[in-house]
Image (cartoon, rainbow, N blue to C red):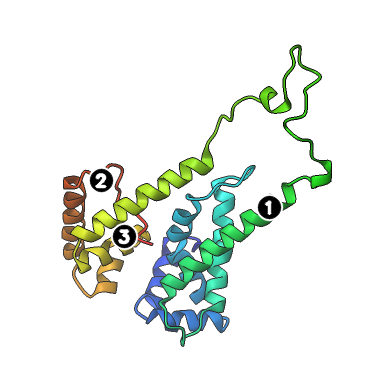
Amino acid sequence: MKPRNNDGRRRLNAEFGRLPERTVVERARGGDAGAMEYLLYRYRSLVSTKARYYYLIGAETSDLIQIGMIGLWRAVIDFTPDKDISFLSFARICIERHIISSIKKATRRKQAPLNMAVSLDHPDHTAEHETTLAESFPNPTHLQPLEMLLQREEKELMHTALQSVLSEFEWKVLSNYGLGLSYLEIADDLGCKPKAVDNALERIRSKASRRRLDGFDPATYDVA
């Protein structure tokens, strides 16, 4: 869910942006539609980032984002102030679990019953020469699961490399910037000036460049 326009976004930020996040979550759980809209909008980039790491045959990334948004909504509903975990960490878990659960359910529905299955070693009587069904199929033209695995490994290596060179402040700036927050929003969250945020991002880019982290983009990087 997104505010209808920039005025709506500014209104939500003005009303909820300075409140403790647990307070906003509690208000959303209590039925405050504005608080719920604020949280769904604030963490929309987190959902988009998580959705890019998964693949479901026949579905677009936008479909997985919608599934992830449901997971985010569930995180708001299920989060309680006494949890020994931040809402951000809890939301990451809920979003990822909901996406994975939905993919598993969709995969099970698409699987044919085993008693209708035919072994790929069965002779293919339609072929001109003696061959099996497995040999008759063309080679796969996509390797999404493998590509996803490689992407995850690359992300873990980049994550480790960044953690080794970034300060605690720079890491917090990167975390917020990757969520789609503006310089002003990050500054408000961290209690600093927007210029400090800008300087931190410049240092982050410089350090990433020195470590030769190709493909690194602070605007889309997910520190989760």
Q: Which residue is mark 2?
A: 213
Occupied quadrant, residue 57: top right
- Residue 43 position in % (x across, y down): 44, 64
Kind of residue at disc 3: Tyr
> Label 1 vs label 3: CA separation?
33 Å
Question: Disc 2 and disc 1: Cα gap in Å?
Answer: 36 Å
Is residue 32 something one can see in this rendering? Answer: no
Question: Left or right: 184 with respect to 121?
Answer: left
**Residue positioned 42% across, 61% down in the render:** 6
In-image side of 123 versus 194 (left or right): right
Mark nearest the camera among 1 and 3 is: 1
Give the residue displayed 29% in from the left and 47% down from the top: 216
Q: Amino acid at mark 2?
A: Leu
Q: Give coordinates of residue 10: x percent, y percent.
A: 39, 68
Q: Which residue position is annotated with label 1?
A: 106
Q: In the rendering, at what x and y percent does residue 119 appear?
A: 76, 35
Q: Could you say whether the residue bearing mark 3 is in a helix, strand or loop?
A: helix
Which mark is first along the chain, 3 or 1? 1
Label 1 Cα crowd, 10 Å radius (few <14 / some 14-19 / many 20+): few
What label does residue 146 carry, if any? none
Secondary structure beneath dot 1 equals helix
Q: Which residue is mark 3?
A: 177
The image quadrant where one finds the C terminus is bottom left
Name the residue nearer the viewer: 175 or 125. Answer: 125
Picture layout, residue 52 above or below residue 39: above
Q: CA distance from mark 3 to mark 2?
A: 18 Å
